[in-house]
Amino acid sequence: MPVEIYLNVAASGLLTGLVYGLMALGLSVIFGVVRVVNFAHGEMMTLAMYLTLVLFGALKLDPLVLLVPIAAALFVFGYLLQIGLINPFINRPEHSQFMLLVAVALILVNVQLIVFGPDAQGIRTTYSFDSYQLGPLIVDASKVYAAGAALVVAAALFAFFRFTLLGKAIRACADNYHGALVVGLNVKRLYALTFGIGAACVGAAGAMLMAVTDVTPTIGPAYTLLAFVIVITGGLGSMPGALLGGLLIGLTEALGGVLFTPSAKSMFAFGLLVLVLLFRPQGILGRKAA
Amino acid sequence: MSLLEGVPRRGLALLAALLVLLLVFPMFASGYLLAVGFLILYFAYVGQAWNVMMGFAGQLSLGHSLYVGLGAYAAAALYVHFGLSPWIGLGAAIALCALAGAAIGFLAFRFGVAGVYFAILTIAFAEFARIGFDHFAWVRGSSGLFLPVANYTENDLWNLRGSPTMFYYLMLAMTAGAFVLCHALLRSRMGYYWQAIRESPEAAEALGVNVFRCKMVAVVISAAMTSLAGVVFAFYYNNLFPEQIFHVSRSIELILGPIIGGIGTLFGPIVGAFLLTGLAEGLRELMLQLGIDVPGVKQVFYGLCLLLVVVFLPDGVWPPIARRLGLRRGP
């Protein structure tokens, strides 16, 4: 009997992990190209979640439909952030860029606190309480939809970077900054597009996550940290690594929550991070740093 | 007096004037102002402790709340459970924090975890401690550890029970002590090694500096200094909650002073603490007068200050002031 409980929890953890993975994919894309660590990642996630909350209340549209306009809105946000604030910082020291984004995160999280208040808020869709049964497994319908949507968005992103000219141009910037300049690419604009794409991933992930869980402003920093843990675990700069890391962390947290106590679940994610840093610092799918 | 060698006479005079001002301040200050003064000195002290790691050795820690919290909990738990004086508890606090700092440093520096990854690792450890202490029954977990408040009429320095004025002077002594220590560290052999590592780890390594060992020393000194602030924090506020003391926002709060004042400078953390805490309390007073009571406004203000300083004054507020005062030559 208990084995089935663990299987159910593991399945649910893996599904949530895919959404986490999409969020982390955004971070990985931004870092892989722009070489800037987006410390405001989780705060952008809660921003997307609040947008979903407001639009759901106003339009009564499904979060899976809302994810399109919300991803677009976050794209614009990310694009402008890169153009306005981060581009002038590209040649500044690493810690200086980091402080800049710490400041952005601090402002974002507290503006959300002022606007939306400190209480947890959630939405109820028509399928919030539905579930599917697969043999011994019972999984929430909303988690299945969210995970499916995360896979679709991730696949679209892979295709974009692999097959489109723009995607190839962005990869060229990531591979060789000066080379990209020499062949005449507008690197600053491509950086802005990349930051926008990374932000759009977060937007989509935020809209999906809203169908699964509640949001508070103060959860933002926790998501930032979660995204970092996932990216470092999976392998920095590796897109499949981010998804794999998401699955692993989702699984670890879910099993940790049921084996010990739910409030201690993120300790296991940190434990995993320490193990990875100890034994495979480049991450599971990462290449060894030069 | 080799310690004073090379310090401009004008600088010494200004420093002495400031010290006298801070010494007589409690005689004129109200209870509220005294509390603000304590807070300023607290941030000046922890800012200096953090500055040893980031400013001198170039290692960015975003998890210094770990050392504040561990120090606070070590001394407070020993006092509550065994009635041990905080000065004995301090020994345990320093040992514990030095060990924690060494563990983090060992994990990171052995495996080339540097820069931003190191910063993430420090946050992860602080978060680990926050959640761990939430479930640590011996120190009452998430319901909080409270210190018995007996009477405030008599100052008992041995047990750190006493008036806010006593805590103010204690914090002032610590801030001054940290200043002297940082001054000495910066001019020591180790201090020069740190600055070499900060500017270029590869070049330092090539010159034969043991980079690993120097970074470890920086982390351990910084952690031990910070734990002392944690002990005083615990006995000043008399209550400890893991959710508050280990929180990331606390780590961010304590690095704002040195960043705004000027990373790597001796006086920057102190100037930053004065500016930031002074302005934030002024803002609070203004909001109180206007009848606005919204949580988060102070942090938005902090964020804007940080943003403005990082964009327009990347070296912080202190270096240009120091040049204006003629305390520092060149760019």
Image (cartoon, coloured by chain):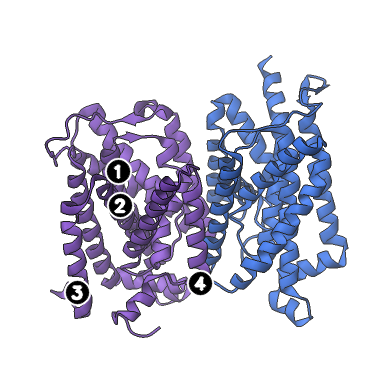
Chain colours: A blue, B purple
Which residue lies under the disc numbered 4? B312
Mark earlier in primary sequence (4, 2): 2
Separation of marks 3 and 1 at Cα, in angstroms:
30 Å
Which residue lies under the disc numbered 1? B233
Q: How far across and how far down the image is residue A286, in percent?
A: 67, 56
Tell me which amino acid carries mark 3. Leu
Mark earlier in primary sequence (3, 2): 3
Which residue lies under the disc numbered 2? B42
Mark 1, chain letter? B
Separation of marks 3 and 4 at Cα, in angstroms:
29 Å
Which of discs 3 and 4 lies nearer the camera? The answer is: 4
Mark earlier in primary sequence (3, 1): 3
Report helix, strand or loop for mark 2.
Answer: helix
Q: How far across and how far down the image is residue B213, in percent?
A: 37, 62
Mark 2, chain letter? B
Tell me which amino acid carries mark 2. Tyr
Residue B69 visible within the image: yes
Callout 3 and callout 4 share a chain: yes
Separation of marks 3 and 2 at Cα, in angstroms:
23 Å
Numbered tag placed on residue B259 in the rendering? none
Separation of marks 4 and 2 at Cα, in angstroms:
27 Å
Who's the residue at 77% across and 26% down the image?
A128
Mark earlier in primary sequence (3, 4): 3
